[in-house]
Each structure stands twice: as structure tokens, then as C-alpha cells.
Amino acid sequence: MTIAVGAKYPWGDLKKLPPPGVNIPEAIILASDSRFSRKMPSGHVPISDVGTKLFPLGSDFAAVYAGISAVGELCFDELRWRLAKESNPNSFRSKKIAEKTFNSVYRQKMASMKLRPEDAPLYILLGVCSKNGQAELYQFSYANGFKAEPVTGVKALAWPETAMTFGQSLEKGLRTKVEDELSLRSRYPQVPMASWVPMPIEPEHVAMLVTAILDRIIEANSDATIGGMIQCAVITSKGVILPEISYSPDPTNEGPGWTRATARPCELIRVTNVSGRFGLHSLEE
């Protein structure tokens, strides 16, 4: 499979932080690993750890996929081309175009590559955020003809055990951060609630936590389909941002320094650009 993550901010415990009646601008966080793998009779075999899985598709939306790589990339290429032809795009129409595009490309490629859907699953998470801070996140699946399914919190596309590990780690990490913030406020009750705005835990902070959890999953090496560096995007009212996130094992900054966890686009490749090397018919993620 792979691990691909989408989250609509804010959700869960994060909603405890704003003062009553205050609407916090929404955002989307997308992330994934960067391993291409091939399905063999003995299991999945890693092929490359510099594969592109997260794609900015416009100034205000991006998508990430899990599943058969060649088809996932073509779905995004075709969607970008179709939306560019729209004179008056809107959320509803763009969603319908995405459904038709993904389903059409998938069906055509399954026929031309002579593959059965059960042997070539494909899942997509697509996020968008308007200029007034209203975000939307949808999941598309080969299993239901790529009908858009709204995601209101967080969604991890991975093998069940990996998805559960990620979900539990993220929930625990966010709860701890929120509880620390609420504890701090309780120690300073004389400070007006309104002064805590803007949000102390912003989308970029959540993206750092997501990256840290994915990095631990990769380091654990418990899933052969997950590896490489992390790809991450934050979509806010300002557009699509690809943050560069690093970590240090030494909080005093006196140790070996900072290690970059996120990949730069220039460091990644697309499977459809290297068909002779990998073979499009057999690559999965």
C-alpha cells in the first residue's frame, strides 16, 4: 500500500482551544511517504524511496494517492488538464469533474494494462481551501467508482495496522498538546480568553506532528511499502504550502544539528517518467 494522510483542520481536541463563538480559519494537511514498491508473490519489494505521491494541482488544492502509481499519476495529470479548461470553476463542479476523471482514467488503464481492480487498488485524498478559509477534504476510492466522500477529521490510507498506529499516535500527540495549552491558560485565569487568538496550535504545527509520526513509522521499518522521506502540504486561505520540516535529537541544538524529514520536489521522481526502469504494470505503493 503506502501511507497517505489527509486531515481537515481543526478537528477533535483542537476545537477546544478557540473561545466560544470564534471561527478559526480551516486548513488541509496532506502527507505521505515516498516509497515505490512492487507486488511480488512473496510480498511487496521496495523499488525506490524517492517517489512522488503528493501533487499540488492548483494554487489552492492538492492531492495524494495510495495504490497503483502509474494510474494515480495519470489521474492527477488528467484532472489538472480538465480543470484548466474550466472558465468558471466552483467546488461542486470541480468535485464532479474529479469523480468522472478518476473513474474514467482508472477504467481505461485497467483495460489497457489487463489488470483486475482487486489487483490494482487506488485511493485518493484531495483537499482544497478557499480564500475565506473554508476547507474541504474528500476521499476517492476505486471500490465505489471514485465517488467523493467527505472527510471531516483525519484519514490515513495504509494497511490497517499501520493506519491504526498512525491514528492512535496522532490522537495522543494532539491531546497532549491541547491539554498542555489548556493547563497553561488555567494558571493564568486573569488573561482574557480573546487574547489567546490566533490559535496556539496552527495547521503548520499539526503538519510537524504528522511528519514526526510518519518519520517514526518509517524508522520502525515494520511495513515494506513505506519508506523514504516524507512529503507534506498545508493548504490554507493563502494557498498550497510545501513546508520544509526538520528535526533534532538534541533540544539544546548542541548535538549533530537538524535533519530534514521532508523531501523537496526536485529530489523526487514520477513513475510515469521512468517506465522503462520500473515497468508501469506492476508498480504499487
Image: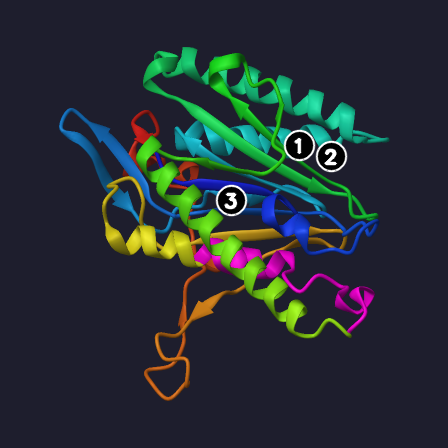
Based on the picture, tell me whether residue 50 belongs to the magenta stretch: no
In the shown orientation, is residue 139 left or right of residue 94?
left
Q: Amino acid at mark 2?
A: Ala
Residue 140 falls in which quadrant of the image? top right
Q: Which residue is mark 3?
A: 54
Q: Are marks 2 and 3 in contact (CB under 8 Å)?
A: no
- Location of the C terminus (image quadrant): top left
Tell me the CA gap for discs 1 and 2: 5 Å
Q: Identify the secondary structure beneath mark 1.
A: helix
Tell me if residue 266 comes above or below residue 102 in the rendering: below
Q: Residue at x 48, y 30 (%)?
A: 72
Q: Secondary structure at mark 2?
A: helix
Look at 60% across and 49% down and name the residue there: 13
Asked if marks 1 and 2 touch (Cβ < 8 Å), the reply is yes
Residue hosting label 2? 84
x, y percentage for residue 61? Answer: 67, 42
Q: Amino acid at mark 1?
A: Trp
Residue at numbered disc 1? 81
Against 153, is 212 above or below?
A: below
Residue 265 visible in the current orientation: no
Q: Which mark is residue 95?
A: none
First in residue order: circle 1 vs circle 3: 3
1 vs 3, front mark:
3
Q: Earlier in the sequence, mark 2 or mark 3?
A: 3
Instruction: Please provide the residue range marked out in magenta.
Output: 191-211
- Percent across and percent down for residue 48 are 29, 47
Rendered position, 153 above or below 269:
above
Please state the total of marks drawn on the protein image: 3
Q: CA distance from mark 2 to mark 3?
A: 19 Å
